[in-house]
């Protein structure tokens, strides 16, 4: 999949068609989902990126990098709307970014607790580790 992102922009569209075909053949393949996410990051397609990152969180709720990416996307959308003078929409994105980054902090805290006290992951996973 990594070769996909080294193609010239004119060939990326064709490569994305192959990626889309792969997604139809293997809809549960996380590698394809993350390749899509990388495509949308490179193309700066923030709204599409939100949907893909939420899908990734649902598939891998323990993956803190996805929470970080989604929080950053919401923050970028917040800044874009604020610069355009759309305060209400900017505030909405800010609140979403804050919520996601709060979830990220909780998950990082859990990871730190696991490292410090060596609590088995399964004992706390069901209580706090969910994408909601």
Image (spheres, rainbow, N blue to C red):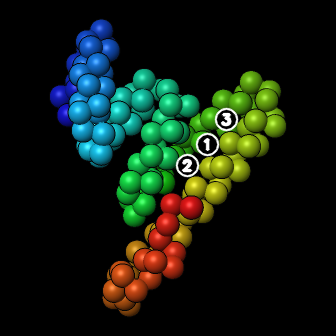
Outermost residue on the front side: it is 25
Q: How would you rate the neighbour count of disc 1 (Cα within 10 Å): few for under 14, some for 14-19, many for 20 or more?
A: many
Quick check: can you spot residue 12? no
Residue 59 position within the rendered picture, expressed as x and y whole percent measured from the top left: 38, 54
The relative height of residue 113 versus residue 16 in the rendered view (above or below) is below
Task: Give the image location of residue 56, x and y in percent.
Answer: 41, 48
- Give left or right: position of 125 versus 24: right
Residue 43 appearing in the image = yes
Residue 91 appears in which quarter of the rendering?
A: top right
40 vs 74, left or right, is left
Residue at the (36%, 29%) spot, across then down:
39
At x 67%, y 38%, the residue is 78
Which of the numbered marks, if any, corresponds to residue 59?
none
Q: Are marks 3 and 1 in contact (CB under 8 Å)?
A: yes
Distance between the Cα atoms at labels 3 and 1?
A: 6 Å
Q: Which residue is mark 1?
A: 75
Q: Secondary structure at mark 2?
A: helix
């Amino acid at each position: 999949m990594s070769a996909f992102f080294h193609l010239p922009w004119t060939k990326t569209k064709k490569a994305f068609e192959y990626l889309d075909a792969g997604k139809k053949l293997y809809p549960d393949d996380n590698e394809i989902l993350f390749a899509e996410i990388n495509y949308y990051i490179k193309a700066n397609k923030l709204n599409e990126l939100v949907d893909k990152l939420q899908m990734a969180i649902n598939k891998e709720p323990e993956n803190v990098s996805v929470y970080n990416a989604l929080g950053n996307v919401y923050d970028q959308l917040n800044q874009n709307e604020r610069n355009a003078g759309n305060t209400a929409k900017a505030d909405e994105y800010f609140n979403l970014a804050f919520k996601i980054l709060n979830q990220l902090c909780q998950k990082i805290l859990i990871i730190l607790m696991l490292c410090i006290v060596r609590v088995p992951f399964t004992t706390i996973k069901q209580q706090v580790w969910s994408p909601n």
